[in-house]
């Protein structure tokens, strides 16, 4: 059973327990967290508290996350934007707000539910019933291209390419501030933030190697439109790396500023190009996902 432990800091003083946990444990739905609190599975200073409890500085939260019981994930007729498809792989243009795979308290409306319906169950089973066909993922509020494997052979092949860092992954993003250099490379290990376990951070001591190359596409008065190419694929890599050099992504409420004149839903980050050696033909396949409408509109405003 996984245990989540956290000590409350000054900036979190007076936050409601349920709201704070929802922001800290983003893979779990708020309704599921509230149920766990109601069932007495969340302790504050060794005492089970109600959802409305107001946290105080130095409070210690302990949450014994129940063991996941793999459910039967249902196929759902959710429209998909398909960029490429054959008997081995499916490349999807994932929309903003869609979670890639089910998690406790959130078993419907995900990409996996949609893919199960579209592929009629013909998916790789390597990652079990919760992640059938899923060989990599992008964040809920990141849009763009994502490959799904239809059989185990394809899954193993593409997973090997990802491990060797030979997959082309190019992203488009808008960051705060005006970048001076036309291009650059950020080579900095990424791991859990030692001060806030909910976040990732540049962590040279305990992190894993991470390399991001960026190039300026257009400069605006207070923002910069950039392209980022990943050598590695760490959790939140682009978001963490750009924040580490003082240019967090526009709309990123976790690593950047909550203050923005634009009405956004999370970070302005789009998986633009995805390229890999096709697992059957062994020929290079590259797919581009067009910028979403909100992103194009934002560029016009800027």
Image: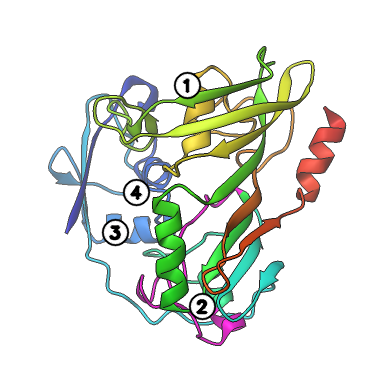
Q: Which label number is shown at residue 244?
A: 1
Give the mark, 3 or 4, whose residue is nearer the N terminus: 3
Q: Which label number is shown at residue 150?
A: 2
Q: Position of residue 228 (x, y in %)?
A: 61, 35
Residue 64 higher or lower than 61, as above or below: below
> Mark 1 or mark 3, which is nearer to you?
1
Is the stretch drawn in magenta largely helix, strand or loop? loop
- Residue in front for this viewpoint, 51 or 295: 295
> Mark 3 or mark 4, which is nearer to you?
3
At mark 1, the secondary structure is helix
Alpha carbons under labels 2 and 4: distance apart: 42 Å
Q: Residue at x 36, y 56 (%)?
A: 34
Label 2 crowding class (10 Å Cα cut-off): few <14, some 14-19, many 20+? Answer: many
Mark 2 and mark 4 in contact? Answer it, CB < 8 Å. no
Label 4 crowding class (10 Å Cα cut-off): few <14, some 14-19, many 20+? Answer: some
User: Is 141 within the magenta?
Assistant: yes
At mark 2, the secondary structure is loop
């Amino acid at each position: 059973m996984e245990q989540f432990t956290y000590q409350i800091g000054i900036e979190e003083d007076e936050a409601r327990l349920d709201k704070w946990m929802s922001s800290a444990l983003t893979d779990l739905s708020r309704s599921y967290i509230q149920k766990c609190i109601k069932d007495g599975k969340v302790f504050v200073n060794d005492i089970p508290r109600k959802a409305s409890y107001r946290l105080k500085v130095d409070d210690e939260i302990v949450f014994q996350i129940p063991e996941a019981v793999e459910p039967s994930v249902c196929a759902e007729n959710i429209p998909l934007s398909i960029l490429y498809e054959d008997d081995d792989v499916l490349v999807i243009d994932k929309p903003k707000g869609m979670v890639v795979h089910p998690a406790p308290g959130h078993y419907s409306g995900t990409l996996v539910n949609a893919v199960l319906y579209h592929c009629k169950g013909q998916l790789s089973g390597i990652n079990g019933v919760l992640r059938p066909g899923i060989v990599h993922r992008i964040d809920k509020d990141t849009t763009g291209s994502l490959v799904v494997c239809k059989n185990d052979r394809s899954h193993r092949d593409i997973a090997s390419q990802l491990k060797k860092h030979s997959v082309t992954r190019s992203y488009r993003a808008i960051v705060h501030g005006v970048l001076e250099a036309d291009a650059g490379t950020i080579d900095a290990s990424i791991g859990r933030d030692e001060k806030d376990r909910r976040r990732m951070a540049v962590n040279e001591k305990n992190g894993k190697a991470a390399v991001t190359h960026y190039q300026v596409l257009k400069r605006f008065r207070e923002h910069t439109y950039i392209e980022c190419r990943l050598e590695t694929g760490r959790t939140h890599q682009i978001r963490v790396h750009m924040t580490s050099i003082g240019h967090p992504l526009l709309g990123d409420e976790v690593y950047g500023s909550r203050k923005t004149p634009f009405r956004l839903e999370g970070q302005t980050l789009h998986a633009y190009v995805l390229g890999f050696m096709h697992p059957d033909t062994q020929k290079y396949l590259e797919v581009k996902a067009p910028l979403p409408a909100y992103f194009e509109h934002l560029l016009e405003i800027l």
